[in-house]
Image (cartoon, rainbow, N blue to C red):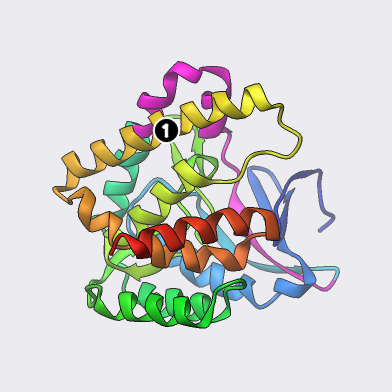
Amino acid sequence: MVLGERIGEGRTAEVYRWEEGRVIKLYKPFMKEWAVKEWETARLVADTGLPVPGVFGLEKVEGRAGVIYERVEGLPLTRRLFEEAEAAEVVGRQLAGLHARIHACEGKGLRPFKEVLRERISHAPGLASLTRGELFRRLDGLPEGAEQLCHGDFHPDNVLLASPEPVVIDWMTAVRGLPEADAARTWLLLEHGGMPPGLPAALQEQLTQVRSRLSRSYVDEYGMLTGRRQADLEAWLPVVAAARLVELGEDEGRGLLRLIDAWLQQG
């Protein structure tokens, strides 16, 4: 079948229109082995009953591997933040509610979250050897054995405002583990994600304030819904931040390294 219009592109894949009501997520050549992993993960997640796109199979197009999904009509939740800055608290609560639903499901068959974090910290650029060693020590001391489903990259861009309810997308990083670790990564992304390139200083300040309200609302609502304490999320922040370094460029990574050092010094 001939590819339709390209409707999205990320660092690892592109999304094209496919046949009626469907899209294909085509991985870039250097990520081709991820297609099978995503297909298997998508089927596991679909069986939970969560609001996720339907998944229909694997396909090769021009030598590239892809996963065929239901086409979901809806804008990313991020769009609401840009259009209604005052909606930050509402969006934060909405995210927390969805995340709590995800964490109520089992993640059997997926990789353990702690295993993934250890692997990423091992390859994280910019860490001094003593810092890396301290992060491994912290990671070893955190709880394990949990089997809950964790998204692994849960943030407003991965929630589509569809009807009759929002739909959670992009499950390629899904793992099983302790929900506090997954929630800590979301908190990190909401409050300390990078700024869009070229954003004027005034808008950067506005975005910083929106992020602060968004993350505060998310953490408060998530704690209320799940009974999990903020301190339990905070314990995971240094290790999830260090694991994120493998995803970042030098400038954004430098800021995250300063945060990691500060959190480690706090004990």
Q: Is residue 218 left or right of residue 204?
A: left
Asked if residue 25 can be seen in this view, the reply is no
Task: Examine the rendered structure and indicate whether residue 207 appears above or below residue 19.
Answer: above
Residue type, numbered disc 1: Ser
Residue in the foreground of this view, choosing between 145 and 209? 209
Disc count in the image? 1
Q: In this view, does 221 lie to the left or right of 242?
A: left
Image quarter hosting the N terminus: bottom right
Q: Please, what secondary structure does the residue beneath circle 1 have?
A: helix
Q: Mark 1 points at which residue?
A: 212
Residue drawn at point x = 39 percent, y = 75 percent: 135
Q: State the residue lying farthest toward the front.
A: 265
Residue drawn at point x = 81 percent, y = 47 percent: 4
**How far across and how far down the image is residue 69, in percent?**
59, 54
Q: Alpha-carbon neighbours of circle 1 within 10 Å: few (<14), some, or many (≥20)? A: some
**How far across and how far down the image is residue 157, in percent?**
55, 41
**How far across and how far down the image is residue 85, in percent?**
50, 19
Residue drawn at point x = 42 percent, y = 64 percent: 240
Looking at the rendering, which quadrant does residue 31 occupy? bottom right
| Residue 87 in magenta stretch | yes
| Residue 3 in magenta stretch | no
Looking at the rendering, which quadrant does residue 28 occupy? bottom right
Asked if residue 237 can be seen in this view, the reply is yes
Looking at the rendering, which quadrant does residue 266 occupy? bottom left
Image quarter hosting the C terminus: bottom left
Q: State the residue lying farthest toward the left.
A: 227
Residue drawn at point x = 38 percent, y = 78 percent: 134
What segment carries the magenta color? 63-92
Task: Examine the rendered structure and indicate whether residue 27 appears above or below residue 110.
Answer: above
Residue in the foreground of this view, choosing between 134 and 92? 134
**How far across and how far down the image is residue 83, in percent?**
57, 19
Q: In this view, does 56 lie to the left or right of 223?
A: right
